Amino acid sequence: MIGGYYFITDHGLSEKGIINDVEEAIGGGARVVQYRNKSGTSRTLYEEALALRKFCADSDVPFIVNDRLDIAMAVEADGIHIGPKDIPMFAIRDSYDGIIGRTCSTVDDAKRYAAEGADYLGVSPIYSTTTKDDAGTAVGPGFITEVRGSVDLPLIAIGGITLEDVHEVMWAGADGLCAISATAGKDVRSKVAAFAEAIGRKKE
């Protein structure tokens, strides 16, 4: 099941490189890793994803590729995460049998993606965020509760989340969360560990 602390790579915020960041994040308790690279060449994406895929497999952590079905298939990733402007779900299911995650910001979208066969939903953006240019308007934690009452899928809360928000986000009905800015830079391991511990307390 997709849940717990969900780590998304960010080259712009990384200080030691995303390979190191992922190693530290998993060491800190990340339960899922998503590889996101919006600016690299296809060759770069392939090489980075291949390295991360191997490390995640050795650590028994699901490895998800953002957007790029070709990269996900080439490195045999565990799954792919797609947004509303990416390749349609039916086109992916025709050629790929891995995990498929979708980003939703309305209840109608959540219901539609569930009906189309999504395996989990990224509920976003919960709070205002600057790590994704097209994130949209913050929906607030109450939206998590709305989606939880409408679909029976794992929900990952994303967008502007800080350590102080974990209680509110998890009690709203999330199965896990991602906090890119709050865990980036130095001491990724300890920052992720703090989130993982807080999530664990709310799930007990």
Image: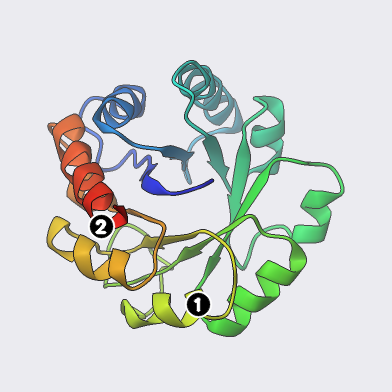
Q: Quadrant of residue 120?
A: bottom right
Local crowd at mark 1 within 10 Å, few (<14), some, or many (≥20)? many
Q: Amino acid at mark 2?
A: Lys
Return the x and y of residue 18 as percentages of the image width and height.
34, 29
Residue occupying image coordinates x 87% and y 49%: 94
159 on left or right of 166: right
Q: Identify the mark at residue 147; answer none if there is no mark.
A: 1
Earlier-in-chain disc, 2 versus 1: 1
Residue occupying image coordinates x 65% and y 25%: 75
Q: Quadrant of residue 129?
A: bottom left
Q: Which residue is tagged 2?
A: 202
Most extreme residue toward the right, as rendered? 94
Residue occupying image coordinates x 47% and y 24%: 56
Q: Amino acid at mark 1?
A: Val
In this rendering, is residue 140 above or below 35?
A: below
In this rendering, is residue 98 above or below 17?
A: below
**Dot 2 and dot 1 residues touching (CB under 8 Å):** no
For the residues labelled 2 and 1, the Cα–Cα distance comes to 19 Å
Q: Is residue 145 visible?
A: yes
